[in-house]
Image: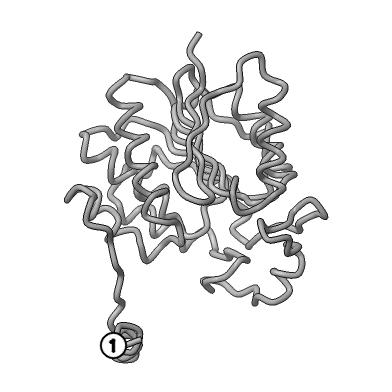
Amino acid sequence: MLKASVQKLLNSLGFDVIRFATNFSPEELEIMRKVKPHTATSQGRLVGMIDAVKYIAANRIEGAIVECGVWMGGSTMAALYALQSLGDTSREIYMYDTFEGMSAPTEKDVMFDGTPAKAVLIESERQDGAINYWCFMGVEAVRRNILATGYPEKRLHFVKGKVEDTLPTHLPGKIALLRLDTDWYESTKHELTHLYPLLAPNGVLIIDDYGHWQGAKQAVEEYFAGLKVRPFLSRLDYTGRLVIKPGT
């Protein structure tokens, strides 16, 4: 109660109080501090992204870093800071988003507690920069956030539109790290169909919404059921999952 009162007072004075767990490295903490204003992603999922970058670098897994569902750009920013800490600015970065907020959900898109996505969106305001389920941020604002990392602009690819419309028209080549964060069944299934085959053997897939949105989980399970070898899938937190694509 007292802590909440102190935080409320500090917030009213213009101070943003962000708590970080103490079991992270100084480098991880620094990256999280830089990107936290630009993401709602948990610390566990952010560190998963950082660790995935280190993994693909250490194992020389070739390919681009791809994110579907960028919002303010915080997760991609974490990856770019991690890449640059390793002295690597050679990878192509692909960011797919409507940059106009969430697309319409279907009846399959239900929260873990049974609440329909449509009901959740009705309660939120579709406003640029607002912190809610609409995840609305214009492409130029996202571009500014990404460029602030110092990563070479020539390596950055912003693909605007619903993934159901932009894929497979705008495809990267080989992918080393693929992060999916578009929440809904239809978009997640579409992304897996067109992008997972491009993920390099031993590459990393991060699924942000597996535990939170039932439709996203259904899309993943349906897609994996059609593969010859089901990949290893590990929990990052209550919703995030990390997958290693089997090697050949």
Residue drawn where x is 23% and y is 54% of the image:
29
Front-most of residues 18 and 66: 18
Task: Tell me where residue 13 appears, x and y as whole percent.
Answer: 29, 91
Q: Is any part of residue 30 visible from this angle?
A: no
Q: Is any part of residue 87 visible from this angle?
A: yes
Residue drawn where x is 29% and y is 38% of the image:
83
Under mark 1, the amino acid is Val
Tag 1 secondary structure: helix
Q: Is residue 12 left or right of residue 105?
A: left
Query: Looking at the image, which residue sits at the far right?
Result: 107
Task: State whether residue 128 is above or below residue 91.
Answer: below
Task: Tell me where residue 217 appears, x and y as whole percent.
Answer: 66, 42
Task: Tell me where residue 200 appears, x and y as whole percent.
Answer: 49, 20
Task: Tell me where residue 25 appears, x and y as whole percent.
Answer: 19, 47
Residue drawn where x is 34% and y is 35% of the image:
53
Residue assigned mark 1: 6
